[in-house]
Amino acid sequence: MRISARVDYAVRALVELAAAGTGPVKGDVIAARQGVSVNFLENILADLRRAGMVASQRGSVGGYWLAVPAGSISVADVIRTVEGPLADVRGEALEDLDYPGPAESLRAVWVATRASLRAVLEQVTIADVASGKLPEVVQRLTDTAGAWVRRPTS
């Protein structure tokens, strides 16, 4: 799975807002803290605002804040908001795929992949990341032998 810059920045921005509490935080402050482009981040924050995850106010005392509790926003929710479905093939829903012949069982592989992603991404919330207290499923998977080893590409 590739995690796009949009997803990475969106999660990081939401974590910053969760850590900040209830007051507004300016987009440029979030961008500076996370070392990301202000303009790119502002576009992402607009998507998160339209999705109802953040609220905003303009002006000298304005900025962004979480519109819902951080514990109610999963990483999967963020991905779906800024990128779309967790898993699809060529833009098609997995359940709509139809492979002929010996490739027929490939659809089940893609569905299992989506289920695996959901098992982690739907369990981890913005509050979990902000607090550093991740669900047990994350700890188990990161403790698995080889989890931190990048496999070379051929």
Image (spheres, helix red, strand yellow):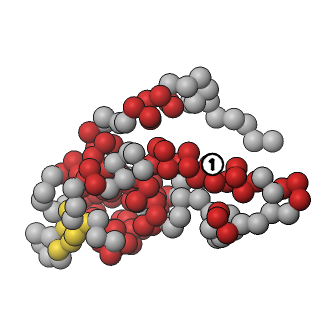
Task: Locate residue 136: give its quadrant.
Answer: top left
Q: Hey, which residue is sitting farthest right in the picture?
A: 101
**Residue 139 lies in quadrant:** top left
Q: Residues within 10 Å of mark 1 (few under 14, many from 20)?
A: few
Task: Give above or below for 78 relative to 58.
Answer: above
Tag 1's secondary structure? Answer: helix
What's the amino acid at mark 1? Ala
Residue 128: percent from the left, percent from the top? Answer: 31, 42
Residue 66 quadrant: bottom left
Q: Is residue 145 visible?
A: yes
* Residue 113 percent location from the top left of the image: 62, 49
Q: Which residue is mark 1?
A: 112
For the point 16% across and 63% down, the residue is: 24
- Whether residue 26 is visible to the viewer of this picture, yes or no, is no
Query: In x, y percent, where is residue 93?
Result: 62, 67
Q: Which residue occupies the foreground of this view, 58 or 114?
A: 114
Q: Residue at x 75, y 41 (%)?
A: 153
- Counting every numbered tag in the picture gives 1
Residues 93 and 30: in front is 93
Q: What residue sits 70% from the left and 52% below the top?
A: 108
Residue 34 percent coordinates (x, y): 35, 51
Q: Is residue 91 left or right of residue 25?
A: right
Left or right: residue 7 versus residue 17 is right
Q: Give the residue drawn at x 80%, y 63%.
A: 99
Quadrant placement of the C terminus? top right
